[in-house]
Image (cartoon, rainbow, N blue to C red):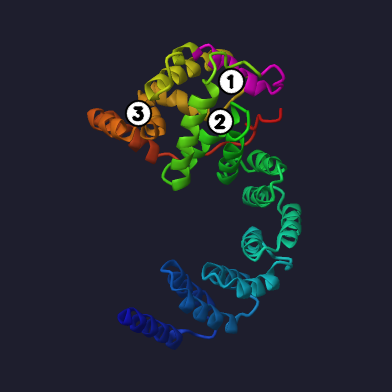
Amino acid sequence: MNKLIILSTALLLSVFASAQPDDAKNLQQTARSFMQTGDFNNAIIVLNRALQTDKNNLELLKDLAMTYYLKQDYTKSYEVVKQIVDRDDADVQVYQIAGNVYRAIEMVKECDKMYKKALKKFPNSGPLYSEYGELLWQKKDFAAINYWEKGIELDPAYGGNYYNAATFYFYTKDKVWSLIYGEIFANMESLSERGAAMKEILYKTYKEKLFADADILKGEEKNKNEFSKAFLNTMSKEAGMAANGVNTEVLTMIRTKFILDWFDTYAGKFPFKLFDFQQQLIKEGLFDAYNQWLFGSVENLAAYESWTKTHEEVYQKFKTFQKSRVFKMPAGQHYQGK
């Protein structure tokens, strides 16, 4: 510990000794290095030094507010946020930082007002829709889903709204959108903890909701969403395969047949990146490995690990395929509510 303190002090002294009056950018980089290592105290010292040379620098003030927030000094973070949240040049990050701070100090009304203002200024910002929806959901306001859906529609490459919407639909009677949004998100964040958690939601939704009844169209008489009806009608053709239970092998067979039928019937009417991706995996001979990755570790971790060892070549080919691509949804493929 003493060695770390001595090193940090020595680094600070060397930075200050070499810093020129106009060297705010270099000081900011040093501060960010401290932030990345969790040394928030020294980051704050360096940022304040940089602000002496450029007191209105928005990027420096954002970093200072965020550093205080990460240090859990919410009062000081709020003092900095007040300086920047009403500025004409406030960007999306300013509002995100402000939202985190307001929620931390339970300024719910101010936070609500701030997000509404931010969305008027940045009406296509996926992160702002996601975080405002989270604020509403924190208040048990079901209008949250409207903002997550709007975020998906206007900023389809941002993952947070898919995660929130999939989780929301999982706890409703809806059988479709938790599956659709959940699988999109699992591919967007294939290595994150949230991505792993979403796999559990996907497996449970197939097992406990979609195929809980032999007739998966039961209760869907009032469903007016054309995409959702197309999904369920196609999936119902394969429902018999789940008669004796749902597992990874069964899901692989059902989902393979689903894609083949979908492209025969609905692909022209509903172009959809997720299903294009699945079709490509089938053509590459990687769909079994993909379904093992998606469901296997949730169903039975030991069996999944055994499968990856006995199918090492194809599994490694799938992992290489997965790492070589960034999964993003394009604009114009938001079908919920239509």
Q: Look at the image and tell me in which quarter the C terminus lies.
A: top right
Q: Nearer the viewer, residue 201 or 233?
A: 201
Residue at disc 1, secondary structure: helix
Q: Dividing the picture into quarters, in which one does residue 14 lie? A: bottom left
Residue at disc 2, secondary structure: helix
Residue at disc 3, secondary structure: helix
Looking at marks 2 and 3 on the same chain, the residue that comes earlier in the sequence is marked by 2
**Image location (x, y in percent) of residue 127:** 62, 51
Q: Which residue is mark 3?
A: 289
Gap between marks 2 and 3 measured at Cα: 19 Å
Mark 2 crowdedness (10 Å alpha carbons): few <14, some 14-19, many ≥20? some
Looking at marks 3 and 1 on the same chain, the residue that comes earlier in the sequence is marked by 1
Q: Give the magenta range.
A: 220-239
Looking at marks 2 and 1 on the same chain, the residue that comes earlier in the sequence is marked by 2
Type of amino acid under label 1: Phe
Q: Residue at x 70, y 67 (%)?
A: 85
Q: Is residue 103 magenta?
A: no
**Image location (x, y in percent) of residue 96:** 63, 59
Q: Does residue 268 show up?
A: no
**Marking on residue 180:** 2
Residue 179 sits above or below residue 32 on the image? above
Disc 2, disc 1: CB below 8 Å?
yes
Q: Dividing the picture into quarters, in which one does residue 108 lie? A: bottom right
Q: Which residue is mark 1?
A: 231
Q: Is 22 on the left or on the right of 135, as rendered?
A: left
Q: Residue at x 40, y 28 (%)?
A: 291
Mark 1 crowdedness (10 Å alpha carbons): few <14, some 14-19, many ≥20? some
